[in-house]
Amino acid sequence: MTTRIVELRRGILKKNDELAAELRARYVTAGVLVLNLVSSPGTGKTAFLERTMRELKAGGARVAALVGDLETDNDARRLASSGAPVRQINTHGICHLDAEMIGKHLEDWPEVALNQLDYLFIENVGNLVCPSSYDLGERIRVALLSVTEGEDKPLKYPTLFNSADAAVITKIDIAEPCDFDRETALKNINEIRPGIRIFETSAKTGAGMEEWLAYLATARATQG
Amino acid sequence: MHELSIVTSIVETVTESLADYPGARVKEVRLRVGALASVIPESLEFCYGIATEGTPLEGSKLVVDVLPVVVHCEPCGLDVELEGVQSFRCPRCGTPSHDLRQGRELEIDSFEIDEVEEKK
Protein backbone atom coordinates (compact mmCIF):
# COMPACT_ATOMS: atom_id res chain seq x y z
CA MET A 1 0.00 0.00 0.00
CA THR A 2 1.43 3.38 -0.97
CA THR A 3 0.03 6.81 -0.38
CA ARG A 4 -0.20 9.15 -3.32
CA ILE A 5 -1.36 12.74 -3.65
CA VAL A 6 -3.17 13.45 -6.91
CA GLU A 7 -3.11 17.11 -7.95
CA LEU A 8 -6.33 18.20 -9.64
CA ARG A 9 -6.56 22.00 -9.39
CA ARG A 10 -10.02 21.95 -10.94
CA GLY A 11 -12.79 24.51 -10.45
CA ILE A 12 -15.78 22.90 -8.80
CA LEU A 13 -18.19 25.02 -10.85
CA LYS A 14 -16.13 24.60 -14.03
CA LYS A 15 -19.07 23.10 -15.92
CA ASN A 16 -21.26 26.11 -15.07
CA ASP A 17 -18.46 28.54 -15.95
CA GLU A 18 -17.96 26.90 -19.35
CA LEU A 19 -21.68 26.96 -20.15
CA ALA A 20 -21.87 30.59 -19.02
CA ALA A 21 -18.98 31.50 -21.32
CA GLU A 22 -20.84 29.89 -24.25
CA LEU A 23 -23.99 31.82 -23.37
CA ARG A 24 -22.05 35.08 -23.07
CA ALA A 25 -20.64 34.59 -26.57
CA ARG A 26 -24.15 33.88 -27.90
CA TYR A 27 -25.60 37.02 -26.28
CA VAL A 28 -22.84 39.21 -27.74
CA THR A 29 -23.25 37.70 -31.24
CA ALA A 30 -27.02 38.23 -31.03
CA GLY A 31 -26.53 41.83 -29.86
CA VAL A 32 -28.70 41.44 -26.78
CA LEU A 33 -27.75 43.02 -23.45
CA VAL A 34 -28.29 40.50 -20.65
CA LEU A 35 -28.73 41.46 -17.00
CA ASN A 36 -28.91 39.22 -13.93
CA LEU A 37 -30.93 40.75 -11.08
CA VAL A 38 -30.15 39.50 -7.59
CA SER A 39 -31.61 40.48 -4.21
CA SER A 40 -33.27 39.15 -1.06
CA PRO A 41 -36.90 38.05 -1.28
CA GLY A 42 -39.15 41.12 -0.99
CA THR A 43 -36.72 43.76 -2.25
CA GLY A 44 -39.01 44.56 -5.14
CA LYS A 45 -37.12 43.00 -8.05
CA THR A 46 -40.34 42.20 -9.89
CA ALA A 47 -41.89 45.67 -9.43
CA PHE A 48 -38.62 47.30 -10.51
CA LEU A 49 -38.36 45.02 -13.53
CA GLU A 50 -42.04 45.53 -14.43
CA ARG A 51 -41.48 49.27 -14.61
CA THR A 52 -38.16 48.92 -16.45
CA MET A 53 -39.67 46.63 -19.09
CA ARG A 54 -42.74 48.80 -19.54
CA GLU A 55 -40.67 51.93 -20.08
CA LEU A 56 -38.19 50.21 -22.40
CA LYS A 57 -41.07 48.82 -24.45
CA ALA A 58 -42.72 52.22 -24.62
CA GLY A 59 -39.42 53.53 -26.01
CA GLY A 60 -39.53 50.92 -28.77
CA ALA A 61 -37.01 48.45 -27.33
CA ARG A 62 -37.49 44.69 -27.67
CA VAL A 63 -37.33 43.10 -24.23
CA ALA A 64 -37.89 39.71 -22.62
CA ALA A 65 -37.41 38.18 -19.19
CA LEU A 66 -36.59 34.87 -17.55
CA VAL A 67 -37.82 34.68 -13.97
CA GLY A 68 -36.46 32.27 -11.39
CA ASP A 69 -38.51 31.18 -8.40
CA LEU A 70 -38.61 28.17 -6.15
CA GLU A 71 -42.33 27.70 -6.92
CA THR A 72 -45.29 29.55 -8.57
CA ASP A 73 -45.44 31.60 -11.76
CA ASN A 74 -46.84 34.72 -10.06
CA ASP A 75 -43.84 36.88 -10.95
CA ALA A 76 -43.90 35.80 -14.59
CA ARG A 77 -47.59 36.68 -14.83
CA ARG A 78 -46.93 40.12 -13.32
CA LEU A 79 -44.08 40.81 -15.75
CA ALA A 80 -46.07 39.54 -18.73
CA SER A 81 -48.51 42.41 -18.13
CA SER A 82 -45.90 44.60 -19.88
CA GLY A 83 -46.73 42.65 -23.05
CA ALA A 84 -43.16 41.33 -23.34
CA PRO A 85 -42.36 37.61 -23.57
CA VAL A 86 -41.67 36.21 -20.11
CA ARG A 87 -40.76 32.70 -19.01
CA GLN A 88 -40.87 31.29 -15.53
CA ILE A 89 -38.10 28.97 -14.36
CA ASN A 90 -39.20 26.98 -11.34
CA THR A 91 -36.15 25.65 -9.57
CA HIS A 92 -38.18 23.45 -7.18
CA GLY A 93 -36.12 24.11 -4.13
CA ILE A 94 -32.79 25.00 -5.74
CA CYS A 95 -31.63 28.31 -4.29
CA HIS A 96 -30.21 29.87 -7.47
CA LEU A 97 -30.36 29.82 -11.26
CA ASP A 98 -27.45 28.25 -13.12
CA ALA A 99 -26.21 28.50 -16.70
CA GLU A 100 -27.67 25.12 -17.64
CA MET A 101 -31.21 26.21 -16.65
CA ILE A 102 -30.85 29.41 -18.67
CA GLY A 103 -29.55 27.56 -21.73
CA LYS A 104 -32.33 25.00 -21.56
CA HIS A 105 -35.10 27.62 -21.28
CA LEU A 106 -33.64 29.68 -24.11
CA GLU A 107 -33.60 26.61 -26.40
CA ASP A 108 -37.20 25.83 -25.67
CA TRP A 109 -38.73 29.29 -26.09
CA PRO A 110 -40.36 29.46 -29.52
CA GLU A 111 -41.56 33.08 -29.34
CA VAL A 112 -38.10 34.45 -28.54
CA ALA A 113 -35.04 34.57 -30.78
CA LEU A 114 -32.03 36.18 -29.08
CA ASN A 115 -31.09 38.18 -32.18
CA GLN A 116 -34.57 39.75 -32.17
CA LEU A 117 -34.04 41.18 -28.68
CA ASP A 118 -32.40 44.32 -27.32
CA TYR A 119 -32.57 43.40 -23.64
CA LEU A 120 -32.96 40.13 -21.76
CA PHE A 121 -33.52 40.35 -18.01
CA ILE A 122 -32.92 37.39 -15.75
CA GLU A 123 -34.63 37.75 -12.38
CA ASN A 124 -32.78 35.38 -10.07
CA VAL A 125 -34.26 33.48 -7.12
CA GLY A 126 -34.62 35.80 -4.10
CA ASN A 127 -31.39 34.98 -2.27
CA LEU A 128 -28.27 37.05 -1.59
CA VAL A 129 -25.88 34.15 -1.11
CA CYS A 130 -25.99 31.33 -3.65
CA PRO A 131 -26.66 33.24 -6.91
CA SER A 132 -23.31 35.00 -6.50
CA SER A 133 -21.42 31.75 -7.31
CA TYR A 134 -23.24 31.07 -10.58
CA ASP A 135 -22.30 32.99 -13.70
CA LEU A 136 -25.23 33.08 -16.14
CA GLY A 137 -23.20 34.71 -18.90
CA GLU A 138 -24.74 38.09 -18.11
CA ARG A 139 -23.02 41.33 -19.04
CA ILE A 140 -24.33 43.17 -15.99
CA ARG A 141 -25.03 41.74 -12.57
CA VAL A 142 -27.35 43.99 -10.61
CA ALA A 143 -27.56 43.82 -6.81
CA LEU A 144 -30.80 45.31 -5.45
CA LEU A 145 -31.41 46.55 -1.95
CA SER A 146 -34.61 48.13 -0.62
CA VAL A 147 -34.81 50.93 1.94
CA THR A 148 -36.67 48.56 4.30
CA GLU A 149 -33.74 46.15 4.55
CA GLY A 150 -31.11 47.97 6.56
CA GLU A 151 -28.06 49.86 5.41
CA ASP A 152 -25.64 47.13 6.47
CA LYS A 153 -26.88 44.55 3.95
CA PRO A 154 -23.83 45.04 1.69
CA LEU A 155 -21.56 44.32 4.68
CA LYS A 156 -23.54 41.20 5.54
CA TYR A 157 -23.47 39.87 1.97
CA PRO A 158 -20.13 41.10 0.63
CA THR A 159 -19.73 38.35 -1.97
CA LEU A 160 -22.82 39.37 -3.90
CA PHE A 161 -22.25 43.11 -3.67
CA ASN A 162 -18.57 42.74 -4.54
CA SER A 163 -19.41 40.75 -7.67
CA ALA A 164 -22.09 43.22 -8.86
CA ASP A 165 -21.65 45.67 -11.73
CA ALA A 166 -24.47 47.96 -10.65
CA ALA A 167 -26.46 48.48 -7.45
CA VAL A 168 -30.10 49.54 -7.31
CA ILE A 169 -31.74 50.90 -4.17
CA THR A 170 -35.50 50.30 -4.42
CA LYS A 171 -38.59 51.78 -2.73
CA ILE A 172 -37.01 55.18 -2.06
CA ASP A 173 -40.54 56.65 -1.91
CA ILE A 174 -40.83 55.13 1.59
CA ALA A 175 -37.27 55.92 2.72
CA GLU A 176 -38.35 58.47 5.28
CA PRO A 177 -40.87 56.41 7.29
CA CYS A 178 -38.29 53.58 7.25
CA ASP A 179 -35.61 55.87 8.74
CA PHE A 180 -33.38 54.86 5.86
CA ASP A 181 -29.89 56.26 6.35
CA ARG A 182 -28.94 57.03 2.75
CA GLU A 183 -25.36 58.18 3.40
CA THR A 184 -24.52 55.01 5.33
CA ALA A 185 -26.07 52.77 2.69
CA LEU A 186 -24.10 54.43 -0.12
CA LYS A 187 -20.92 54.31 1.96
CA ASN A 188 -21.38 50.60 2.73
CA ILE A 189 -22.01 49.69 -0.91
CA ASN A 190 -18.87 51.59 -1.91
CA GLU A 191 -16.82 50.00 0.84
CA ILE A 192 -17.61 46.52 -0.54
CA ARG A 193 -17.57 47.41 -4.23
CA PRO A 194 -15.52 50.54 -4.85
CA GLY A 195 -16.63 52.63 -7.82
CA ILE A 196 -19.95 50.83 -8.51
CA ARG A 197 -22.79 52.74 -10.20
CA ILE A 198 -25.67 53.16 -7.74
CA PHE A 199 -29.25 53.95 -8.77
CA GLU A 200 -31.80 55.20 -6.23
CA THR A 201 -35.21 54.24 -7.53
CA SER A 202 -38.91 53.88 -6.91
CA ALA A 203 -40.99 51.63 -9.15
CA LYS A 204 -44.04 53.41 -7.77
CA THR A 205 -43.13 57.05 -8.45
CA GLY A 206 -40.63 56.41 -11.23
CA ALA A 207 -37.84 58.18 -9.36
CA GLY A 208 -34.38 57.31 -10.68
CA MET A 209 -35.76 55.40 -13.68
CA GLU A 210 -34.53 57.88 -16.26
CA GLU A 211 -30.93 57.55 -15.09
CA TRP A 212 -31.25 53.76 -14.96
CA LEU A 213 -32.67 53.53 -18.49
CA ALA A 214 -29.90 55.79 -19.81
CA TYR A 215 -27.35 53.49 -18.19
CA LEU A 216 -28.94 50.45 -19.90
CA ALA A 217 -28.94 52.19 -23.29
CA THR A 218 -25.26 53.11 -22.96
CA ALA A 219 -24.32 49.60 -21.84
CA ARG A 220 -26.14 48.12 -24.83
CA ALA A 221 -24.57 50.52 -27.28
CA THR A 222 -21.06 49.74 -26.03
CA GLN A 223 -21.44 45.95 -25.90
CA GLY A 224 -19.20 43.57 -27.84
CA MET B 1 -27.28 26.90 0.91
CA HIS B 2 -25.88 25.23 -2.20
CA GLU B 3 -23.14 23.37 -0.34
CA LEU B 4 -24.75 20.00 -1.07
CA SER B 5 -24.64 20.53 -4.83
CA ILE B 6 -21.03 21.68 -4.54
CA VAL B 7 -20.10 18.60 -2.56
CA THR B 8 -21.95 16.36 -5.02
CA SER B 9 -19.87 17.85 -7.82
CA ILE B 10 -16.68 17.17 -5.81
CA VAL B 11 -17.67 13.52 -5.40
CA GLU B 12 -18.34 13.19 -9.15
CA THR B 13 -15.04 14.80 -10.16
CA VAL B 14 -12.90 12.76 -7.76
CA THR B 15 -14.71 9.53 -8.64
CA GLU B 16 -13.98 10.16 -12.34
CA SER B 17 -10.28 10.73 -11.63
CA LEU B 18 -10.15 7.51 -9.60
CA ALA B 19 -10.57 5.50 -12.79
CA ASP B 20 -6.81 5.91 -13.23
CA TYR B 21 -6.14 4.28 -9.85
CA PRO B 22 -8.12 1.05 -9.67
CA GLY B 23 -8.81 -0.22 -6.16
CA ALA B 24 -7.48 2.94 -4.54
CA ARG B 25 -9.06 4.24 -1.36
CA VAL B 26 -9.50 7.98 -0.89
CA LYS B 27 -8.14 9.30 2.41
CA GLU B 28 -8.44 13.03 1.99
CA VAL B 29 -9.76 15.67 -0.41
CA ARG B 30 -8.30 19.16 -0.25
CA LEU B 31 -10.16 22.27 -1.44
CA ARG B 32 -9.09 25.85 -2.09
CA VAL B 33 -11.93 28.18 -1.16
CA GLY B 34 -11.65 31.96 -1.43
CA ALA B 35 -13.01 34.15 1.35
CA LEU B 36 -15.49 35.53 -1.22
CA ALA B 37 -16.65 32.16 -2.54
CA SER B 38 -19.87 32.34 -0.50
CA VAL B 39 -19.65 28.83 0.86
CA ILE B 40 -19.31 27.95 4.52
CA PRO B 41 -16.53 25.43 5.23
CA GLU B 42 -18.49 23.87 8.12
CA SER B 43 -21.53 23.32 5.87
CA LEU B 44 -19.29 21.74 3.24
CA GLU B 45 -17.87 19.33 5.80
CA PHE B 46 -21.33 18.46 7.07
CA CYS B 47 -22.68 17.79 3.56
CA TYR B 48 -19.53 15.90 2.63
CA GLY B 49 -20.30 13.13 5.11
CA ILE B 50 -23.74 12.65 3.54
CA ALA B 51 -22.73 12.98 -0.10
CA THR B 52 -19.83 10.53 0.13
CA GLU B 53 -21.86 7.68 1.64
CA GLY B 54 -21.71 4.62 -0.55
CA THR B 55 -19.10 6.19 -2.87
CA PRO B 56 -15.36 5.50 -3.14
CA LEU B 57 -14.90 8.66 -1.05
CA GLU B 58 -16.78 7.34 1.96
CA GLY B 59 -14.85 7.83 5.19
CA SER B 60 -12.40 10.31 3.69
CA LYS B 61 -11.61 13.65 5.21
CA LEU B 62 -12.41 17.01 3.60
CA VAL B 63 -9.80 19.70 4.18
CA VAL B 64 -10.76 23.26 3.29
CA ASP B 65 -7.97 25.80 2.81
CA VAL B 66 -9.52 29.27 2.99
CA LEU B 67 -7.73 31.86 0.84
CA PRO B 68 -7.84 35.51 1.88
CA VAL B 69 -8.90 38.21 -0.56
CA VAL B 70 -6.03 39.82 -2.47
CA VAL B 71 -6.52 43.04 -4.43
CA HIS B 72 -4.12 45.01 -6.57
CA CYS B 73 -3.39 48.46 -5.20
CA GLU B 74 -2.60 50.89 -8.00
CA PRO B 75 -0.81 53.60 -5.93
CA CYS B 76 1.33 51.04 -4.08
CA GLY B 77 1.87 49.00 -7.25
CA LEU B 78 1.39 45.84 -5.17
CA ASP B 79 -0.98 42.93 -4.66
CA VAL B 80 -2.15 43.29 -1.07
CA GLU B 81 -3.98 40.87 1.20
CA LEU B 82 -7.15 42.14 2.92
CA GLU B 83 -7.80 41.30 6.54
CA GLY B 84 -11.48 40.58 5.95
CA VAL B 85 -14.30 41.14 3.50
CA GLN B 86 -15.83 44.24 5.07
CA SER B 87 -13.70 46.82 3.36
CA PHE B 88 -12.00 46.67 -0.02
CA ARG B 89 -9.22 49.15 0.66
CA CYS B 90 -5.47 48.74 0.58
CA PRO B 91 -4.33 48.13 4.19
CA ARG B 92 -1.13 50.11 3.47
CA CYS B 93 -2.50 53.31 1.95
CA GLY B 94 -6.30 53.12 2.29
CA THR B 95 -7.09 53.42 -1.44
CA PRO B 96 -10.26 51.50 -2.48
CA SER B 97 -9.67 48.76 -5.04
CA HIS B 98 -11.94 46.50 -7.08
CA ASP B 99 -9.05 44.82 -8.87
CA LEU B 100 -9.49 41.39 -7.30
CA ARG B 101 -6.55 38.99 -7.64
CA GLN B 102 -7.66 36.24 -5.24
CA GLY B 103 -10.70 35.39 -3.14
CA ARG B 104 -13.35 33.81 -5.40
CA GLU B 105 -11.65 30.42 -5.82
CA LEU B 106 -13.77 27.33 -5.39
CA GLU B 107 -11.65 24.42 -6.52
CA ILE B 108 -10.44 20.94 -5.75
CA ASP B 109 -6.74 21.25 -5.07
CA SER B 110 -5.83 17.57 -4.71
CA PHE B 111 -6.81 14.28 -3.17
CA GLU B 112 -4.84 11.67 -1.29
CA ILE B 113 -5.22 7.96 -1.92
CA ASP B 114 -3.91 4.66 -0.65
CA GLU B 115 -2.90 2.83 -3.75
CA VAL B 116 -3.01 -0.92 -4.16
CA GLU B 117 0.40 -2.02 -5.35
CA GLU B 118 0.37 -4.10 -8.48
CA LYS B 119 1.52 -7.66 -8.08
CA LYS B 120 4.50 -8.43 -10.23
Image (cartoon, coloured by chain):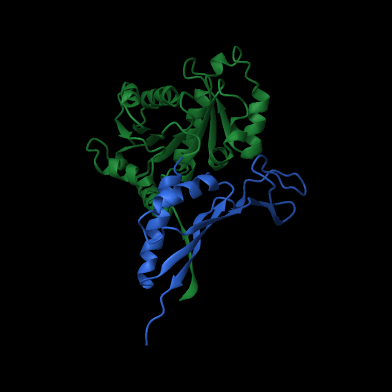
Chain colours: A green, B blue
User: Is residue A135 something that shows in the picture?
Assistant: no
Please determine whether, in this image, residue B60 is positioned above or below residue B120: above
Residue at the extreme bottom: B120
Viewer-closest of A165 and A77 = A77
Viewer-closest of B5 and A109 = B5
Across and down, in percent, residue A19 comes to 37, 52
Quadrant holding the C terminus of chain B: bottom left
**Going 29% across and 40% down the picture, which residue do you hit?**
A105
User: Is residue A30 something that shows in the picture?
Assistant: yes
Across and down, in percent, residue B59 comes to 44, 58
Across and down, in percent, residue A49 comes to 42, 26
Residue at the extreme right: B93
Q: For residue A200, which quarter of the picture? A: top right
Residue at the extreme top: A177
Q: How many marks?
A: 0
**Going 50% across and 38% down the picture, which residue do you hit?**
A129
Image-based side of A74 in relation to B46, left or right: left
**Going 59% across and 30% down the picture, which residue do you hit?**
A153
Please determine whether, in this image, residue B74 is positioned above or below residue A143: below
**Going 66% across and 46% down the picture, which residue do you hit?**
B97
Across and down, in percent, residue A53 comes to 39, 26
Image-based side of A87 in relation to A7, left or right: left
Viewer-closest of A187 and B31 = B31
Q: For residue A111, which quarter of the picture? A: top left
